[in-house]
Image (spheres, helix red, strand yellow):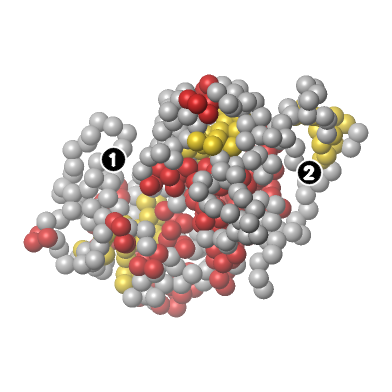
Amino acid sequence: ARLTNVAAAIAQSAGNDVVVPVEMNNPSPKIKQKGNQEVEVVQPIGPQGRLFYCGSTGSGKNINHSILGIFLANAFFPEIVGGPPNTGREEGGEEKVDAILLTPETLGDANVDDILVFHMHQYCGVDVLAFPGRQLHINHPTNGFNAYGRYTPPSDNVFVIGPHEEGPHSIQLPYAMMKWWVLVKGLGSNGENDLPTMEKFFIPAARPKNTGKHFLLYVNSHYVAHREMAAFTLSQLKPMHAMGSCQGNIQAVPEMSGTSRAPRCQPYPEELRPDSVIVPGDSNRESNYFNRVTFQDFRFMLLFEDYNLPGYITDRIVDGFMSGTVPIYYGTEQVFDVFNPKAFIYYDINNPQEALDRIQFLEENPNAYQEMLNEPILADGERTIEKYFSFDDSIGNGMLKRRVRKKFGFPI
């Protein structure tokens, strides 16, 4: 059956919550009520609020990051005006309104009803704290704000969504889910959600499958010691394909740069590369670096996080599942709350033998491998969808959307 509303039958614990509207020119707040009891004060949002964003003047990757933030804001706050820039016209000729790039000039036009989205690695030409409206910071904007753990907002109008602990101004949501939402919206047409992308994650029978042609793919270019060691170790089981600079060359430790960004790996010189490492002849970042068509030829993908931190789950594991491979993953064990532990291999860098034995067993027992490949991707079906993937009302009853709106003081 085609997916319609994955969690439509789940009862809403907050189903009796209502918002009593007030005139928008009335400075008094909206009052949220449960039955006859007033339980929360919610500040009003003007009806003409606009969406501002940072960073689309940078590289192509920065532009993509900015689009991610706009997609999130459009999902959570549909009443705020402004979509992805340069998206043309909707079907029927209705012109779309682009979100506004934050500049010194546009900052002067912003007001308290507006919202700013600010993504990690983005450049803003102005001090974002001067923005008068609410701000949604995504992951950890590199502006001197704390990146992980307990979040201390630099201003009362700033909220963050990402790996931080849940708090009054923070919503813990791993980056992997946000990138999944970009796929859902980016592959959809006319602003609709892309149903096949949703089904691949939500319906076990629709989980992508690889061709089984090759053993293992390793795609990375930045050096992390535990990841390179795992790549070297796994390449001893069977030959490993490597795209990018990293090839499990554990003898070549690059010089640390003194910045927070990992240095580039040093690949094997071609004449010294062992037979256990295969570099495809057409391997290059532009054509293959994140090409799921190429990825689907592999039974496994090595997908390690740089760090093991609470809430830190990047889109690496999403790429693995969407490519039809079995991810070999290392990172926070919080991943088990999102993804089914029977659907992938968790590689404990402090005790790797269990993972190595499991991989060897699956290679020697194709039926057992197929059983893993047929496992549901998500840890707990509709509960997982509600908690991590319900970006709009058509998915998991919009529970994540409601959570974000409540935090921001929007009616739910």
Q: Is residue 403 above or below residue 212?
A: above
Gap in angstroms between the C-alphas marked 1 and 2: 45 Å
Q: Residue at x 46, y 75 (%)?
A: 370
Left or right of 405 on screen, residue 209: left
Question: Which of pointers 1 and 2 lies earlier in the amino acid sequence?
Answer: 2
Q: Residue at x 59, y 27 (%)?
A: 110
Element on which disc 1 rests: loop
Left or right of 47 on screen, residue 152: left
Residue picked out by circle 2: 14
Element on which disc 2 rests: loop
Left or right of 257 on screen, residue 98: right
Viewer-nearest residue: 170 or 85: 85
Residue farthest toward the right in the current orientation of the protein? 36
> Which of the 4 image quadrants contains residue 263?
top left
> Which of the 4 image quadrants contains residue 62?
top left
Look at the image and tell me whether residue 247 can be seen: yes
Measured from the top left, where is residue 306 in percent x and y? 36, 44
Q: Residue at x 53, y 21 (%)?
A: 130
Residue picked out by circle 1: 262
Residue type at mark 2 is Ala
